[in-house]
Amino acid sequence: MSLRRVLALAFKEFLQVWRDPRSLSVALLMPLMQMVLLGYGVSLDIRRVPLCVEDQENSAASHALVQDFIASGWFAITAALQDEAALRTAMDRGQCIAAMVIPVDFSRVLDDTGQATVQTIFDATDTNTTNIAIGYAQGVIQLASADFAARWAGSHGTPLARVGVVDFEPRVWFNEGLDSGNFIIPGVVAVILALVGAQLTSLTISREWERGTMEQLISTPVQPLELMLGKLVPYFAIGLFDAAFCLAAAIFWFRVPFLGSVATLAVTTSLFTFVVLGIGYLISVRIRSQVGASQVALVLTMLPTTLLSGYTFPIDQMPAAIRALTFIVYPRYYVSILRAVFLKGSGVVELAFPMLALSLYAAFIIWVAARAFRKSLD
Amino acid sequence: MLGRLRVMLMKEFLELRRDRWAMFRLVVPLLVQLFAFGYAATFTVSHVSTAILDLDQSSLSRALISHFTATSIFDVVDVATDQREITRDLNQGTAALAIVIHSGFAADFNNGREAPLQVIVDGTNSNTALIALGYASQIVSIFQSDETTQVLPASAGAGAPQRGERAGDPAAPGTITLSLADQPWFNPGLNDRWFFIPGIIGTLVLVQIVGLTAFAVVREREVGTLEQILVSPISSFEFILGKTIPFFLIGLADVALIGVVGVLWFGVPFVGNPFLMLLGASLFLLGVLGLGLLLSTFSRTQQQAFALNFFLLNPFFILSGFAFPIAAMPPFLQWFTYLNPLRYFLVVIRSLFLKGVGFYDLWPQFLAMFLLGAGALAISVMRFSKSLD
Amino acid sequence: MSGAGPAVLAEGLTKIFGRFTAVDHIDLAIAGGEVMGFIGPNGAGKSTTIRMLCGLLRPSAGRAFVAGFDVARKPEAVRAHIGYMSQKFSLYGDLTVRENLRFFGGLYSVKRAEMVERMRFAITMAGLEGREDALVDTLAGGWKQRLALGCAILHRPPVLFLDEPTSGVEPEARRRFWDLIHELAGGGVTILVSTHYMDEAEYCNRVALIDRGKLAAIGTPSELRGHALGGVLFELECAPLGAALSILRAAPGVIEANVFGDRLHVLLADATAAAHLPSLLAAASVHAEPPRPIAPSLEDAFVSLVTRAPHMPAAP
């Protein structure tokens, strides 16, 4: 292996990327655009659930209950409904996600029995939002119960009969604010690198075939391994630059809490970047037209990355067969690595398994690429 | 005009038919993505790995724990003996949720005091954490009311407890409990697929048809036949019609195909009016085709079309409400979604599948799609007339 | 080079693509310092043969040795000892002249100490002094061609393969290029050049005529010119050419008749038949000058060797 040849190839490749507007825009514009789009657009935080209220009683108690809902900050009242028909229309038209129906004998039943039930209707079309809204509503109603009890005790001057109450104390570790951005944005970085990396290198070999320079190259003593290294080195530098940009944006712009070490980040990111570039390179070797190569690169990386990497849809909730499939989706490992480093401060030791998986991938790629590229025209 | 249009359509169909791979390329990726999304896309929390630390070891604490384990959602992966184990479980990710019951729990509860129950959740995935906490909260509620009815046997089945039965105030009820009767409408089982699969109709059609349309025109431009055609008496408008009608039909076929698979294979209900669906799909396709054409007027080569395709479709796909609620986006992105025909189509299609609404409920969406589509087409026609020099 | 013997040796070299035989059992022996021309119509198999000799294609049958190395068994050794200029010149258009030279020098591991001198040599040879920092895309055909040659010889290879290096290049540049080739050959470099320009065949030490994958003839230009045409060659000016051609081809005693530029070359079985031709043509209202005997050119020889006569390009 000649270092001289590798360097000659690397320098040439770098010059070509530098002077090619398309490569540059993929390298620089795409990560920026994706960071903005995905960083802001991908969010599951439903802060204020639109709520409609059909208050059949209109009493002090029912108003107090509605107030409790508003005060929680989790709901925003969008409409006060008159009757069932209005409720149906509101739900049909999607004017609210949740609707509360306070029965006409609410206060009386509460005074008599100490227990009252309020109907809450949810537009369950969006199941995730509904689940979260149900959780919010549960939280509010428990607080409301305590409020009502306290109010009752206060107005009557006596405490309630002693019955035990479970004091539900939720604690959140690692992402205390329960900000979906904190778990999505590290994943976004992984997705961007996977897409950009594959796009960058998918063109490199096919471009040489199309221009005819490949024929010239393979008539020289250059070895397939030297060719691969020489071509990947500049893209590696670009990939790391992009990664640094995205990670910095995640930490300083989107303010994702970062508990880990920069060293761990550097090691794991380098490993992942190498895998990603290698995949694009492989595609480029197999497909000799530039249009074909970049299309295949996109299609092959887009679907698995967005769907099966765990960056939005949690892998451990998927059916077993699909979960098994995700073991070969390489972005999955980097997504979990980034999340662990950011939110848990994990180090290389804790990340042994995903890093091993990525290393295996890297080894496999080198092996396949070395065999796939033949120095011949047929 | 009709004659020229017919000739153009014949050419398009001939080319399509000669390309034997065309059917394959059209249908297979569609089905693959449909099934991939159908099975992998899920926000439902169906199981939570749970660690339990019971330092009280009373019959009450065991009763509470069994409330959790009785559901299929909480999977006990570790019964810990001290706090350190819990910490380790959470740190390593073995457990996503930990229930900690301190000693004295039963004593506190039975003496009418507050009995603290710690539920620690791994907030890394805030979405599943929130939902898991919601479930836990519900279970605690149920436990609470179960225990309360046991402690107050008189109120268990007989209706109102008698006033004055308690020690203390003769008029005090046992406790005040408010509860919710949750009724999910339109999707009572809270089935994720009923949410995603109708949406997939929109996203897949968008991605496929925009791509096809843009490429078809650009390919003619690249090869040089475009010039040839436009030199003939055909007008820009006729040309565009001829190019887009086949894709319009393919788009409708796509909608039908995915819809049928969704209903028959995935079991998603369809309670709406098929004609409204046809209308909605047609208006949506208007916008989609307009987008594709607009794209093609900005691209000289297939390479450019491809890059532009990706840059344009990506935002349209993400910022549509397909998987991530528009309400969760910052205002400046929400404004963008008003220009996205997919946003409106998603409302239409989800309403038709799950709610069975009528025209009067959907007319704003129809109008929006119509305006967007007509606008895009108009701009395309104008650009076409100019772009030839 | 290991051992004495021809610099390039091919024995029964064959290449089959599917059912199509592109190269059909070609035998060649090129001595050191010789300039061998490959002439033939497009699609005859010239490029395919050259690619096999460079180790770019595997022969379907037969053997070849370049600089003493077996191309099938030791392709890498072959590559280290050859220079190759592919049909598309294949320089990097988005790199400058200097960057291209440095790149190829690096690929061939030209020693650094030598690089400076070799680069200067290549730039001077190409006439690109003062334009070292120009992007290659901005250069015209002739400059690119010479630069590509320069890139191919930085490492002083003993054997050079040039695949249609003069296509699409202005005549002045072509002549200049051939001067360069002879200079290199004078220094002992063995050069195999393919071309479809007939007149360039005259510049070579020997010429191999390739037609439909087969070696139709091989020899020095004068040997080929002296190839027995099997008749006497006359040149005839007449008009209209088309009508004359059909008449003559049907006339007795005429072996062959072809258009050459603005006149006809007619091959007669016997010189005496020439006298009758003008009257034969006049009877059909074709005006004709008296025919003149001419010495056959290389082109004439090729035309008769290759039976696709009407398709051979006329001498420019």
Image (cartoon, coloured by chain):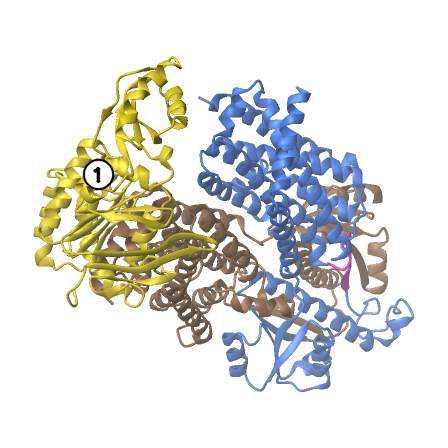
Region of the chain picked out in magenta, as a range:
B177-190
Look at 35% across and 20% down and name the residue there. C241
Instruction: In the displayed orientation, state which residue is furthest to the front.
Output: C272
Image-based side of A101 in relation to A208, left or right = right
Determine whether B177 is above or below B239 in the image. Answer: below
Q: Residue B347: x percent and y percent? A: 69, 43
Query: For residue B109: magenta?
Result: no
Q: Colour of chain C?
A: yellow
List the residue tagged with mark 1.
C200
Q: Which one is nearer the viewer's eye here, B383 or C224?
A: C224
Chain under label 1? Answer: C
Quadrant of the image containing the N terminus of chain A = bottom left
Residue type at mark 1 is Glu
Q: Residue A272: x percent and y percent? A: 41, 64
Determine whether B34 is above or below B220 in the image. Answer: below
Q: Residues within 10 Å of mark 1 (few under 14, many from 20)?
A: some
Q: Which one is nearer the viewer's eye here, A22 or A139?
A: A22
Quarter of the view holding residue C52: bottom left
Letter of the chain in brown: A
**Res. B374 in view:** no
Query: For residue B179: magenta?
Result: yes
Q: Residue C193: x percent and y percent? A: 23, 47
Instruction: In the displayed orientation, state which residue is furthest to the right.
Output: B158
Dominant SS of magenta comes to strand
Letter of the chain in blue: B
